[in-house]
Amino acid sequence: MNINGRKVGKRVIDDPRNVLYKECVRVIREALPRSFMLENVPGLVSMAKGAIIKQICEDLAVCGYDVNWDILNAADTACPKIAGVYLSLALAMI
């Protein structure tokens, strides 16, 4: 989700870049990997009062995946992120 598009200090929910995850869902639905991981900014969890993360999880569940997510500290994962935390969507096929 893109949080760079801002309007008067607020996130712009209808920014067209915010639906890129749908292309990820399409590729996952077609490839049907046993498992995969998506990552994003932690602000995704609070966007639209949690409705965005819920929609992403529901879209992936329809494809047959059990979805679990958490916000991780990049320093704990050996991930060379500049930002200190990131959102991890860890998914495994049912």
Image: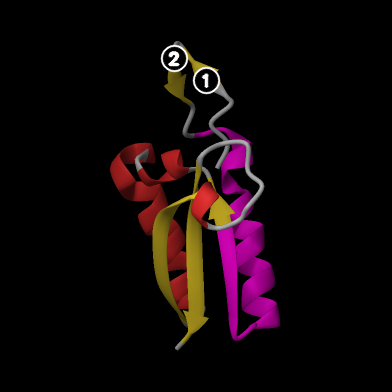
Residue at the spot of label 2: 9
What percent of the width, then of the height, locates residue 80?
Answer: 66, 47
**Three-letter code for the amino acid on which mark 2 is drawn:** Gly
Q: Check residue 6 in the rendering and tell me which mark sits there, or answer none.
A: 1
Magenta stretch in the rendered image: 14-38
Q: In the figure, is residue 79 to the left or right of 67?
A: right
- In terms of secondary structure, where does tag 1 sit? strand
Is 31 a magenta residue? yes
Up/down of 67 relative to 20, above or below? below
The residue furthest left is 49
Up/down of 79 relative to 69, above or below? above
Q: Dot 1, crowdedness within 10 Å: few (<14), some or many (≥20)?
A: few
* Alpha carbon distance from label 2 to label 1: 6 Å
Residue at x 58%, y 67% (from the top left corner): 37
Q: Main secondary structure of the magenta part?
A: helix
Pointers 2 and 1 in contact (CB under 8 A)?
Answer: yes
Q: Dot 2, crowdedness within 10 Å: few (<14), some or many (≥20)?
A: few
Figure quadrant of the C terminus: bottom left
Residue at x 55%, y 42% (from the top left corner): 1
**Three-letter code for the amino acid on which mark 1 is drawn:** Arg
Residue at x 45%, y 76% (from the top left corner): 62
